[in-house]
Image (cartoon, rainbow, N blue to C red):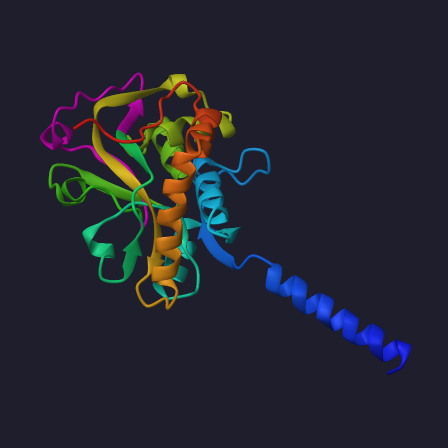
Amino acid sequence: MSLFTRFLFSGVWIFATCNALASPVIHAVQDVWPPYIIDTSDYPGISVEIAQRAYASQGYQLEIDIRPWSRAFKEIQHGRDQIVIAAWYSASREPQLRFSNPYLYTEISLISRKDHPVPFGNFEDLKGKTVGIVEHYAYDDDFMTSKWFQRVPASDLITNIRKVLVGRVDLFIEDARVARWTMVENSISPEEFTYIHPPVSISPLYVMVARDNPNAQVYLEAFNRGLEAIKANGEYDAILHKYDSGLPLVKKPAQ
């Protein structure tokens, strides 16, 4: 065997060995949704870090492509071999989509301009009001079916924030922590808004995958195992502490 042939075989063997040792990759699609999905290297987001560490503990590498939510949701619906790492459950999604165990809880609140507060105890209090929502988000079923107010869809959260500021809608609905991060990132003062209590709902966050994805069971079971592992070794609490900016993260709602 010539020296060149031995070198060629050695190169092929090294390449094959490196390939075999590389962690399998799981692809995720998601919109920017701070502080859960931030798309920066130092602070990629709570959901990003939880999912990455959970999957890494099970031998997987997670790669995330940032998309507008409507596009990301359609890609998952159409059965591409991808996951969404921060999704709410709804009964309407159940026929097409599967969900992991919940890993965090979000308090979904109504938000208005501070100089136009809206008393709220139940949906009847919103009679005649307009509420900005984001297209394809899975809001509470009671909120989505109430006849007392009008839901006005927008493509993203910042559009709803600006609509409330200029009076085009009366309120918008969002996780209060997400709203504050988005306002600050867009040079809008959170002090111009009122966060109305009680929250409309406390909604768990899940990893989501299409039912017809042949790897769905593998992806969800790996995440669930990894989630328990990073809770046990302290990584989960460390991630939450990193992003806690005065609005306590909800690990589990009070019973």
Residue 5 drawn above or below residue 206: below
Report the side of 124 relative to 239 (left or right): left
Residue 116 drawn above or below residue 220: above
Rendered location of residue 79, percent (x, y): 37, 66
Disc tally is 0
The quarter of the displayed image where residue 167 is located: top left
Rendered location of residue 22, percent (x, y): 60, 59
Rendered location of residue 122, percent (x, y): 11, 28
Q: Is residue 119 magenta?
A: yes
Q: Nearer the viewer, residue 156 or 48?
A: 48
Q: Quadrant of the N terminus?
A: bottom right
Q: Is residue 139 magenta?
A: no
* Magenta-highlighted residues: 110-136
The quarter of the displayed image where residue 214 is located: bottom left
The extreme front residue here reads 1
Q: Nearer the viewer, residue 124 or 236?
A: 236
**Residue 69 visible from this viewpoint:** yes
At horizontal 77% and vertical 70% (from top left) the residue drawn is: 11
Report the side of 253 relative to 85 (left or right): left
Residue 20 drawn above or below residue 156: below
At horizontal 66% and vertical 65% (from top left) the residue drawn is: 17
The extreme bottom residue here reads 1
Rendered location of residue 228, percent (x, y): 36, 41
At horizontal 57% and vertical 38% (from top left) the residue drawn is: 40
**Residue 170 visible from this viewpoint:** no
Q: Quadrant of the C terminus?
A: top left
At horizontal 60% and vertical 64% (from top left) the residue drawn is: 20
